[in-house]
Image (tube, rainbow, N blue to C red):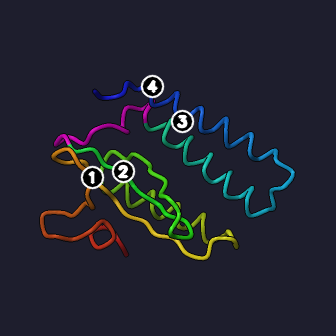
Amino acid sequence: MAMTKEEIIEIYEERIRILQGQLDDPENDADDIRHFEAQIREAQYIISRVEAGTARWSPDGRKLEVWNIINPPREPDYYPVPNPREGHELICRLADDQLTMDWIVSNAFGLEVFEEGKWSEWYNEDGEDVDQVFGE
């Protein structure tokens, strides 16, 4: 069963509250703080897209999410996006934010689609991934 807009917003608001609590930890250095602030901005961005009605199932019924792994092999963070173009824009914003963080040694990004009951990497009808389609 699909989540309601209110449920999605509640989840991201809780994520923001948790991240804001982490900002107050005196053990954090400047890179930690920048990382938490970037995650808060992304959560706020997602909430704004949900409220505007643009973060939802794509018109053809596929659900899309950007994945981001910081310093692999850590677990990925996932961000819902309404379409591949906005997925690429989010990947670029995340990458730009992460370039300013010295503690990030490497990162990886991609766009996944939920089809036939499972997540898999998104490719267009020509077999190109999100970066090949929208990259510079």
Discs 3, 1 touching: Cβ within 8 Å: no
Q: Residues within 10 Å of mark 2 (few under 14, many from 20)?
A: many
First in residue order: circle 1 vs circle 2:
2
First in residue order: circle 4 vs circle 2:
4
> Eyeballing the image, is 24 above or below 109?
above
Extreme-left residue of the structure: 125
Discs 4, 2 touching: Cβ within 8 Å: no
Q: Main secondary structure of the magenta part?
A: loop
Alpha-carbon span between mark 4 and mark 2 = 17 Å
Horizontal side, residue 123 vs residue 101: left or right:
left
Horizontal side, residue 74 vs residue 57: left or right:
right
Is residue 56 found inside the magenta-colored segment of the image? yes
Horizontal side, residue 114 vs residue 54: left or right:
left
In percent of width and height, residue 92 lies at 47, 64
Q: What SS does tag 2 mark?
A: strand
First in residue order: circle 3 vs circle 4:
4
Residue at x 55% of width, y 65% of height: 70
Q: Which residue is mark 2?
A: 65
Q: Which residue is mark 3?
A: 12
First in residue order: circle 3 vs circle 2:
3
Nearest the camera: 128 or 20? 20
Nearest the camera: 134 or 20? 20
Q: Which residue is mark 4?
A: 7
Mark 1 or 2: in front is 1
The kind of residue tagged 1 is Trp
Alpha-carbon span between mark 3 and mark 2 = 15 Å
Q: Quadrant of the N terminus?
A: top left
Q: Which mark is residue 119?
A: 1
First in residue order: circle 3 vs circle 1:
3
Q: Which residues are magenta?
A: 50-61
The kind of residue tagged 2 is Glu
